[in-house]
Amino acid sequence: MSTLKGKILAGKVLVKPQAAEEKTSSGIIIPDSAKEKPLKGEVVLTGAAKKDEAMEVKAGDMVLYGKYSGTELNIDGEDYLLISQSDILYIA
Amino acid sequence: MSTLKGKILAGKVLVKPQAAEEKTSSGIIIPDSAKEKPLKGEVVLTGAAKKDEAMEVKAGDMVLYGKYSGTELNIDGEDYLLISQSDILYIA
Amino acid sequence: MSTLKGKILAGKVLVKPQAAEEKTSSGIIIPDSAKEKPLKGEVVLTGAAKKDEAMEVKAGDMVLYGKYSGTELNIDGEDYLLISQSDILYIA
Amino acid sequence: MSTLKGKILAGKVLVKPQAAEEKTSSGIIIPDSAKEKPLKGEVVLTGAAKKDEAMEVKAGDMVLYGKYSGTELNIDGEDYLLISQSDILYIA
Amino acid sequence: MSTLKGKILAGKVLVKPQAAEEKTSSGIIIPDSAKEKPLKGEVVLTGAAKKDEAMEVKAGDMVLYGKYSGTELNIDGEDYLLISQSDILYIA
Amino acid sequence: MSTLKGKILAGKVLVKPQAAEEKTSSGIIIPDSAKEKPLKGEVVLTGAAKKDEAMEVKAGDMVLYGKYSGTELNIDGEDYLLISQSDILYIA
Amino acid sequence: MSTLKGKILAGKVLVKPQAAEEKTSSGIIIPDSAKEKPLKGEVVLTGAAKKDEAMEVKAGDMVLYGKYSGTELNIDGEDYLLISQSDILYIA
């Protein structure tokens, strides 16, 4: 994983999205249904805690998040997704 | 029940949904009416308390919740439902 | 009245609805008009107080509440209504 | 005035509506215009103070309130109106 | 000015509206434009301060307020306007 | 600049609008584009600080603000604009 | 970079937008996709901290922000963009 020197705002999480099909060693499988599928990714960067919300994830955590969460960013040639921590569904 | 090693955010509850028809030993029956039917499930994982909301359920609790609550997740091959604690209608 | 062993969340009230036509010993009559009619019921279970809202009703209280308040639940074969305390109009 | 033994929630006021046409001894007259007319009534019961709102009316106060405020209740055969204190326009 | 014996709720101001055309001794003139014209009146009664809002006007103050602010009231045969203090545009 | 003897509510700023075309000594130029143009004016009067918002402008400050901000007032024959401090875009 | 003598309100950030195509020394590349592209710019001025939000950027920071964020301002002949700090996606 490339090391990012930048930072993000409080309450935010920068995620490196992963391919939806593969089954990781932690065993997360994306359900194959008509419903909106959660996606997974690795946390790369986290912002500071907000006044009413502690940060509960850290860099390296594998997380599930909703399909339409966040904003895509390309930094140093890599694609990332910036989401709010509250968009995270599960931390493997 | 499989043991999950992951965690979920504050105020959230991960539920293992159960078949709507069966009558459990705790006697919960889903009403058969035209209205939206509550569903039941077993609490598998709970997040931390939020600033304004204590956690009132624990793993192992059988709960009723609204039909359209939460987000379906498949973890380690099992289907779960992630809901906010405030979506819980009754704790058996 | 059957005794319920379960519990409900903070700020919630579980009510055993009563027939709208009868006149109770406490003299509550449902007005017969074109407007939305309040319903009455007996409080069976109450949740804990919320941070900004003390619980002002207790099990056994006869209450009036709006027609479209709450969610119907069937527990141990009995029909109940789960409402927020703030939906209660009058405590007899 | 009949004495009510029941109670109402914090921040609420139970009013005994009075005929809109009469001119009371306190001299309140309902304006006769095309605009929505305020109504008047006597406060019969008041709830407790809320965290952010002291109770500023008491039983016996004559009050003006908006035409579409509150919920009609019939208790012991008498018609009342349950309003939020904040719906009160003037306390005579 | 008639003396009112009643009172109004916290954060509220009772105003005796004045004719929009005249130019008062304090020199306030209502602009003659296509835009919504502010109106002026004399403060007759003020409610108590609210938790988050001090009262900044007092009886006798001449104020400007928006055309569609408040609720008309007729008390003791006089027309008044009940507005929220936050509807006041200028205190002469 | 005429001296105003009145006052305005907390968080509010009374501005004397200036002609949009001229270039002031402080060098502020209104951009000539299809987008909504900010306007400029001189602060004439400021209200008190609000509980959650300190006052950051003072009488005499030249400010930029959005085209559709505020309410026009004519006081003592002069046109002013009453805006919320939060409508101010830049303080020269 | 020209030095600005003015100031902006709490929580706000004044940005000097940069051309979207160039690749900066810090390696930020704007993704070329059908989705809304983030833009980049250099922070020129920051407002004070707000009660619930610390300022996390400073003059000189290179930032990414959403395409439709903020208000364009021309000050001393230069084009700037005024955004809320919360509109910032990434700080390089």
Image (cartoon, coloured by chain):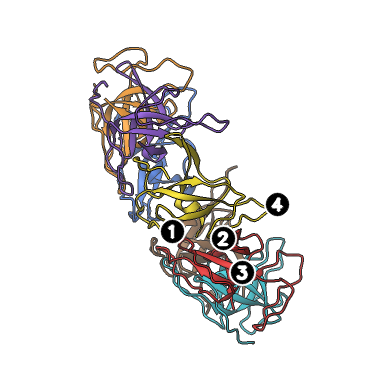
Chain colours: A purple, B yellow, C red, D cyan, E brown, F blue, G orange
Is residue E88 something one can see in this rendering?
no
Cα–Cα gap, marks 1 and 3: 55 Å
Q: Quadrant of the N terminus of chain G?
A: top left
Q: Which mark is residue A40?
A: none
Looking at the rendered structure, the kind of residue marked 4 is Ala
Please give the residue where the numbered disc 2 appears in the rendered image.
Answer: B27
Question: Residue F86, image x and y in percent?
Answer: 39, 44
Q: Residues within 10 Å of mark 1 (few under 14, many from 20)?
A: many
Is residue B52 something one can see in this rendering?
yes
Mark in front: 4 vs 2: 2
Q: Residue at x 58, y 31 (%)?
A: A34
Secondary element type, mark 3? strand
Report in which chain the residue with disc 1 lies: E
Q: Are marks 3 and 4 on the same chain?
A: no
Looking at the rendered structure, the kind of residue marked 1 is Ile
Question: Residue E72, image x and y in percent?
Answer: 61, 64
Cα–Cα gap, marks 4 and 1: 59 Å
Contact flag, marks 2 and 1 (Cβ < 8 Å) = no
Cα–Cα gap, marks 2 and 1: 67 Å
Report in which chain the residue with disc 3 lies: C
G12 sits left or right of B77 in the view = left
Secondary element type, mark 2? loop
Mark in front: 2 vs 1: 2
Please give the residue where the numbered disc 1 appears in the rendered image.
Answer: E91
Q: Are marks 2 and 3 on the same chain?
A: no
Q: Residues within 10 Å of mark 4 (few under 14, many from 20)?
A: few
Cα–Cα gap, marks 4 and 2: 21 Å
Q: Which mark is residue B34?
A: 4
